[in-house]
Each structure stands twice: as structure tokens, then as C-alpha cells.
Image (cartoon, rainbow, N blue to C red):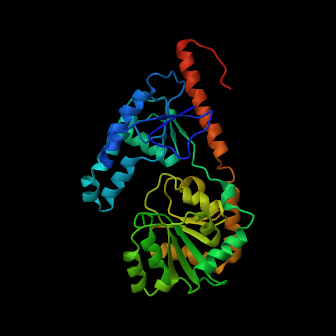
Amino acid sequence: MTLVSTAVDPAPQPPLVWNRVTMPRVPDFAVPLVYPSRATRSLSDFPFDIRHNQGGCALRIQDVITAHSCHRAWWEMKFRHGETSRALLNPQHHAILRTERANYRPGSFARVIAVSEGVGREVSSLYGVPADQIRVIPNAVDIRKFQPSDSHVRRKRVRELHGFRSGDVILLWVGKEFRRKGLAPLIEALPMLPERVKLLVVGGGDTKPFRDDAGQRGVLERVVFAGHSAQVEDYFLAGDVFVFPTLYEAFALVTLEAAAAGLPIVTTKVNGTEDFVAEGENGFFIERNSTSIAHVLNALVKNAELRQRVGEEARRRVASYTWESVARRTRGVYAEVVQERDRRRGVRRRFN
């Protein structure tokens, strides 16, 4: 197996080989335009059975593309929500869209792996990818990382660090793009919840507008902005409910991480969550407004047994979302491609 990239850390060990792609100094927005041709040239001398593009570039020769997202769907969402100028004036968006169009041009791939049913629908409707060429293989999570043997110790440490009391119910929000991922309506819902409900925000970004908003609503003392954490799993262990009123996702890893930590999932119905969350069983769907958020959360805040039952079911369901499963199913896609190619060539062989 050969990894093709500009950089990798840590350095790969055999049998993995690193094929380094050198890049000239170009502005960030130009990277999606320059990298594909250089990556393609670096592969020209190798007779690979499968060329798997992880979606970040447009190889001239490829067999499988993983659609980790659909940038065009996200871009069009920005138009619908009043961000037209930002979407049009940022050159990086146009460079990524050009790369994405090249990825899905007819005849340039054999299979597309979509990380969610929704992303599969997007690349099909926006780029005409035939449905019979799409395979959905969802993201995975390292279950063990979010279920350590000392979880109670870690939970207590984080809660004490941020001044929470034993009777507090902690709503956890994790992410970077505060606006897109719905932090504002969550803060707006906080005054509708009991005083013992606190909000723990984990992730980097400009917190001032949200601090100001919380202050104006009289709930600033109930909101903790923890910033970025290299041990984010400890924060999942410290929470009681994971709340994610996001506007658009491909398949947010944080939902699987929260489930692995045994938290009930309260989220908007977007790509990925619509596949994973079963209403009332391992989570609840909300609208992106404070009234809907408060309605669902009040029921969970008042009922510790409900929180525990839903959280345990979330943990049970996420157990199948392993990287071993992703690897096995991806290998199955490789087998499809090779066998299809062999049939065209009249070759017969077994794919182990």
C-alpha cells in the first residue's frame, strides 16, 4: 500500500510506503488547483490495482473516491442562509468546487464511497453520479478512547475544573464553527431551562459575540467556554447531554464520539444524524430554534433515568461504527472494482 500526500505525521511504517508530493509555494486557495496534477504525475510509474482518492484532490486516474462531504451542497446552503457575498468572494471555495467537479466527471471513477446517505444523495443530484456506483460507508470512532476504565475520575476532574456542582446537568457542545453548528440558538434556549442546567462549549473560535449574547440573556454565568482541548474525550465524559443544532454536516464525528461516551444525542436532522439517531431511542431531533431545543432538553433534564437509558442505547448502537468495519467494507468496494475490471478484460482471479 502506498500513501500519496505532501506530508504525513507520524512517518509511515512498512508495509505502508509514502510517496511524497512536492508542492511549489502557492496561496492556500491555489492548492486544490495545483496538487492534482502533481499527485497524478507521482503515480504514473506505478501499476496499482486500486487508486483511492480521499476526496481532497482530483486525480486524473482514480478508481475509488471517498466523498467526505459535498462542498457544492455546503456552498449552496450558504446562499440560502444569507452568506452570498462570503461564498462568492472567497477564492478557495471556487478552487474546491473546480476540484470537486473534476472528481465526479463521467468516466473518472468506478465507485464513490459516501460517508452518509445524505452525502450520497448530494453527489448524485448535484454531479450526476449514478446511484449504483455509490456505496455508503459511514465514519467510525475509536470506542475505547471514549470508554476508559477511569471515566468517573476524568468526569469528576473536568467538572471540578470548571466549577460545576454535583447536581448540575451539563449540556455539551463541541465544534469550531460556532454559527453554523448552532451555538446561538442553544444559548437562546438556556433561560428556558432550570438554573442547574449549564452549557459547556468546547472548541476554538471567536467567543465574544456569544459571550455578549449570553450576558444579555442573563445566563453568562451558566456558560463555560473551555476552548480547544487535546483531550476532548474527557469533556464528553463530563457531559450529561450532547446538543448539536447544526445547519449542515457530512457526518459529524462528534455525534459518534458523544454516543461512544454514552451521551444522549440531541441534534438537528442532517446528513449522518438521520442515519444514526433513532428518535426517542438513542437521541432526539430538534429544530434549529430555541423553543424546540428547550422543549426536548427540559424532558431530559427532569428525568435522569431517561438520560441514562437513551445514553446507554446510543453507546450500544455506536459499537458497530468501528474502523475495522470501515476497512472491511472498503476492501469490499475494492473487490467490486477489480472484479468488474477483470470481467471486462476476460480475467478470472480470486480477491482475498
Residue 284, quarter of picture: bottom right
Residue 352, quarter of picture: top right
In the rendered image, the vertical position of residue 228 relative to residue 346, given as above or below: below
Q: Is residue 336 visible?
A: yes
Residue found 53% across the figure and 53% down from its top: 272
Horizontally, residue 30 falls left or right of residue 144, namely: left
Horizontally, residue 79 falls left or right of residue 215, namely: left
Residue found 44% across the figure and 57% down from its top: 248
Q: Quadrant of the N terminus?
A: top right
Nearest to the observer: residue 150 or residue 189:
150
Nearest to the observer: residue 233 or residue 279:
233
In the rendered image, the vertical position of residue 243 relative to residue 141, given as above or below: below
Percent position of residue 300, x then y: 62, 75
User: How many tags in the picture?
Assistant: 0
Percent position of residue 112, x then y: 49, 36
Percent position of residue 278, x then y: 61, 59
Nearest to the observer: residue 293 or residue 184:
184
Q: Is residue 108 visible?
A: no
In the rendered image, the vertical position of residue 262 relative to residue 44, given as above or below: below
Residue found 64% across the figure and 46% down from its top: 323
In the rendered image, the vertical position of residue 213 relative to residue 2, given as above or below: below
Residue found 48% across the figure and 78% down from its top: 189
Residue 206, quarter of picture: bottom left
- Residue projecting furthest to the top: 346
Horizontally, residue 325 falls left or right of residue 89, namely: right
Percent position of residue 255, x then y: 57, 60
